[in-house]
Amino acid sequence: MGASRAIRVGTPVEALETPVLVIDIDAMERNLARMMSILAGTGLSLRPHLKTAKSPALAQMMIRAGAVGVCCAKLSEAEVMANAGITDILLTSEVAGVGKFERLVGLAGWVPNFKAVVDNAHAIRAIAGLSRAQGVTTKLLIEVDVNTNRSGVVSAQEALALADLIAETEGVELLGVHGYAGHAQIRPMETREPVNEAAMTTLEEAVELLREHNHSIPIVTGGGTGTSELDAARGVLNELQAGSFLLMDTAYRDAGVPFELALRCRSTIISRPAPDRAVCDAGQKTMSHDAGPPEVEGRPGVTYRRGSDEHGSLIVDPALLDRPLEVGDVISLVPSHICTTVNLHDVFVGARNNVVEAVWPIEARGHIW
């Protein structure tokens, strides 16, 4: 007996084995249309970050809608997308260590519009040396720390020093700057706007200094789902790296981000040990909890309390139930953090009007190297 399950187009959603991730295709398409509408006429192009969807099929859907390319967080993600025929990929995390620079340069020689971020001279020299040996020129972007206290150079002067090094080094080419204001994304608008403004001012200062010193900076990339409207209005970026907008989660919803929840996990009640408790088949191996527990949708009086490996423990308030909650019932769970939840699954099931219309492999699931 195999461990795979058959999910067929035309199957009613109610007939799917659980746990299973189901995308409301209509809602997803509205999210994509809304994002393209936000960016239309602003000079800001969409370069969706695939650390969220991890699926070449969804990446290609966004490219067909007008995205200029994609972002990947890890080399293995980029390799999956390249294998799927995607030709414009930005690697947004620095790399180092065994095999990493070799694989990066390999992608540069394979993918026509591959580029990678750097924030140190060691990486630039290593990439350049391998590029010369392979007879390729690797396109680079300098990452600027826009007050996230993560990776990236911490001053415009440091960015200039790296730009000068790239300019004088054979085998590499400077294509732009990268600055992702991750700390501005999931927060109320009253604090989101000033935090993002400070980030974009920092990035703008670096861009201006590099251009003053005759460095061509055709790409200024960053931003995300939470700051999409702010970034479209601000005018510093010309690429937006939003990814979560397509499927969404409760963290972004609660921050007031204007996209629809498009993904749910269907989960079955497997135990009803007491009137005030129930257990479902979606634990921490099914739904991530780093941003809090998932939300039980459409079942008043039922709250997801905690997850163990394979079990989801639910609190039940019998007085609030609108109908009995019984073993075998299926509940709908909305993830609190879409990116880390998707990475736990092999497939998305795309449904329209509660009928399966597509099955999309999550081919970069687990690709963290």
Image (spheres, grey):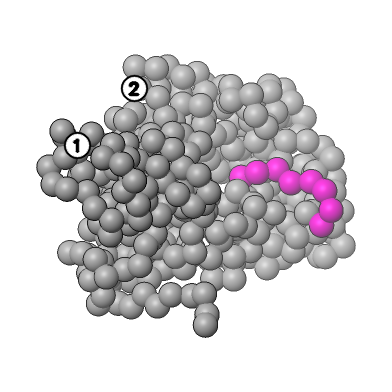
Label 2 sits on a secondary structure element that is: helix
335 or 256, nearer to the observer: 335
Relative to residue 331, is residue 3 drawn left or right?
Answer: right
Front residue (pair 116, 25): 25
Residue 203 screen position, x and y as percent? 56, 27
Vertically, is 21 above or below 38? below
Q: In the image, residue 49 lies at what x, y percent?
A: 50, 49
Q: Position of residue 66 (x, y in %)?
A: 37, 57
Which residue has dot 1 on it?
318
* Residue at figure coordinates x 53%, y 49% from the top left: 309
Is 232 positioned to the left or the right of 330 in the image? Answer: right
Q: Amino acid at mark 1?
A: Pro
Locate residue 34, reporting x and y percent: 26, 46
In the depicted structure, whether residue 36 falls above or below residue 113: above
**The residue under label 2 is which amino acid type?**
Met
Residue placed at 19% from the left, 36% from the top? 318
Which region shows up in magenta? 92-99
Mark 2 neighbour density, 10 Å: few (under 14) some (14–19) many (20 or more): some
Q: Quadrant of the C terminus?
A: bottom right
The reply to whether callout 2 and callout 1 are in contact (CB within 8 Å) is no
Q: Which residue is mark 2?
A: 189
| Mark 1 neighbour density, 10 Å: few (under 14) some (14–19) many (20 or more) | some
Q: Which quarter of the picture shows residue 39?
A: top left
